[in-house]
Amino acid sequence: MNVAKLVIAGAAAGVLTAAIALPAVGGAGLTVKGTTEELELKPENLDEPALSELTKIQDVNGKTIAQFYHENRQAIPLAKIADVMKTAIISIEDFRFYQHGPIDLEGTARAMVKNVTGGGVVQGGSSITQQYVKQVLLNKAETKEEKQAAIAPTLSRKLNELRYAMAIEQKYTKDEILEKYLNISYFGASAFGVQAASKRFFGKPASDLNLVEAATLAAAVQNPEATDPNVNKERRAKLQARRNLVLDRMAQLGKITVAEATEAKKQKLGYKDTPIPGGCEQSKYPYFCLYVKNEILLNEDFGKDTAERKKFLDAGGLTIRTTLDPKMQEAAEKAIKKYVKAKDKPVASQAMIVPGTGEIKAMAASREYGTNKKKNEMSYNLVADVKHGGGNGFQQGSTAKAFTLATALEEGMKYGDGNNTGKTFHVPRIEDTSFRDCKGRRVGSEWDVFNSSEGGGGFKTLQTGTWGSVNTFFMKLEEKVGLCKVVKMAEKLGIKRADGGPLVQVPTFTLGVNEMDPVTVSNAYAVFAARGQYCRPMAITEIQDRTGKVIKRPKPKCKQVMDEEVADAVNGILSGVFTKGTMSQVGGINRDAAGKTGTTDGYTAAWFAGYTPNLASAVSIGDPRGAFKHDLTNVTIGGRFYAYVYGASISGPIWKQSMMQALKGIEATSFFPVNTERFGGCSDACAPKPKKDKDKDPDGGPPNDNPFDDFFGDRDGDNNGHGDAGPIIPGRH
């Protein structure tokens, strides 16, 4: 058989003319007729989509806390790649790279002869530029057919590569082409690009590679699957053999001495198998990570649908700066671990949010995130709603009473106003009820609401009814101000069900029958701290693209939803929860703070939601196996037995410890004083009439009584400062 002849006619003006005299050859994947054809190869522009790059999520200090990637790649400039790496890759892949023109005609001619006589593409001979083109085409391919076409062993594919390569050589300098090649190439072990490969193989950036390491990475690009060091010993042996070949080639070309090559070949492979954390599962702060991830997936600014947004997140090479404060996060995690163990069936979770901005500073839970049931891991976001990867949440219990309190104050009631309440409140049947939802429909079913802690009834004020968390008091208060008004107040504060469904509007709305998540409850209470300003929960402060350009810098989305003085009045009453109410046994945090315990009917869950002017937080505890089936009675949590778990039993102490630690170093600020002219005393509807005042105090109480009673009215003359009709039993609701 005659040997094929390839005569290079010229390469002028960007046009390459080749006269090819080929014998009749048949082979797998290749058929060439015995004729002489003249081919004009003209440069053809290549579409170069942006490379898939690793996205980093950072905390408020700029430290990476999570990574997302479709391909583990971090593109870097050539200047940040060690010179020895450049030398090694050029030596083994295209030693004439800086000498030849648009294509390596000598290498191409040699390869084409081999390919024709071999019946297929049996020799590469491709320049680095051609290899780059091939990688671009492969990366662009989305379907199986497109991927096969990008690597098909045909002359037509090879000729197309040549056309694209000619255009690339015209478009970029040699250094720019080498940089692109090193950033696009796959090295094995799930590492794309030289920077990711250097970190994966050797735990260092590409700028710090030494001779042995550079030769190893240069060896990996030819057939990364066959030499993947992460697979087994055999493939690591193949990689080491190929590395030694690279070292010999470098010595042959005079890039290193023979002695240097000999010494380098004695070295072990040195593969470190450095982990490449990806996704929220491997983040130090998985629950916050899930929140951020879903913020991207829910935002139409980042793609027309979820699939497009996920691609943007996984492949965009973004740097996402967030609101997470590691100091506050640590405070929450430590407090939770003190009271609830990861192996416990009930789970505690907590969110911390800044009033006036909505910035989420911490999201913590007692269990690790993951799918390993043996390790008691949770597979969803315990701290957030379904939209942000969460579950259905837990009934919020008496933390919902704050919304009824706020409604009453907004309706013009005063601190001393209230109602006579008994041990039970009868909810009448629908035809007799006065409760109506926001569509004007009668709601309810005949049953009785009981107080979980108070021994007696009597007159309760807005203060004492709140401090004692009296169920029957709040049922009558909600009935008075109107169920719909309470629902609308809750909605203004951002309250929504964790499962995304509409709020259940029933008479017991004020007792917290709707399931919530800590982020939602914490953010609602932050409105009181911000004097009536609602801010949407915020986790992302800045997004940079792969070039470092800021493409989005979200601002707090806030609006005034409540009169400032009404919020001040709410703060004034909720502050007393720590000193005169259900948190008095737990105590305060040595600065202005307000809050509300929340125990659900049947002890299915327990909450505490509270705030200072600087920070709001909500803590929940419940059993994710089913709160009604697995209630919080006769349970051991954190190594301690509880006959009943109240809001102040576990959630309250977690809140106290975490808030004290989180606020260390932050100057204490005070709540605005209550407008006593507007909210002090009681209205004309005040009842019952005061007793005879023996010491002429304004409250009508006995001599030397409590001054707090003087201002707000001592209804029972017991000097306890509550103005109630019975003692407050702390820590019970």
Image (cartoon, helix red, strand yellow):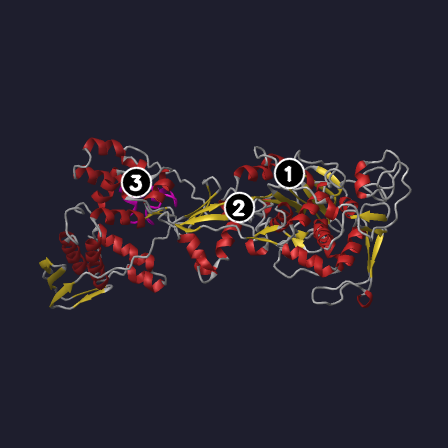
Q: Is residue 230 magenta?
A: yes
Q: Amino acid at mark 2?
A: Pro
Q: Nearer the viewer, residue 586 or 92?
A: 586
Magenta part of the protein: which range? 218-242
Label 3 vs 2, first from the N-terminus: 3
Residue of label 3: 80
Q: Nearer the viewer, residue 600 or 693?
A: 693
Q: Nearer the viewer, residue 656 or 373?
A: 656
Residue visible at 63% across and 61% down? 501
> The residue tagged with tag 3: helix, strand or loop?
helix
Q: Amino acid at mark 1?
A: Ser
Residue of label 2: 286
**Residue 637 in the image, given as x and y percentages of width and height:** 69, 40
Q: Nearer the viewer, mark 3 or mark 2?
A: 3
Q: Nearer the viewer, mark 1 or mark 3?
A: 1
Residue of label 1: 670
In the image, which disc is placed on residue 63? none
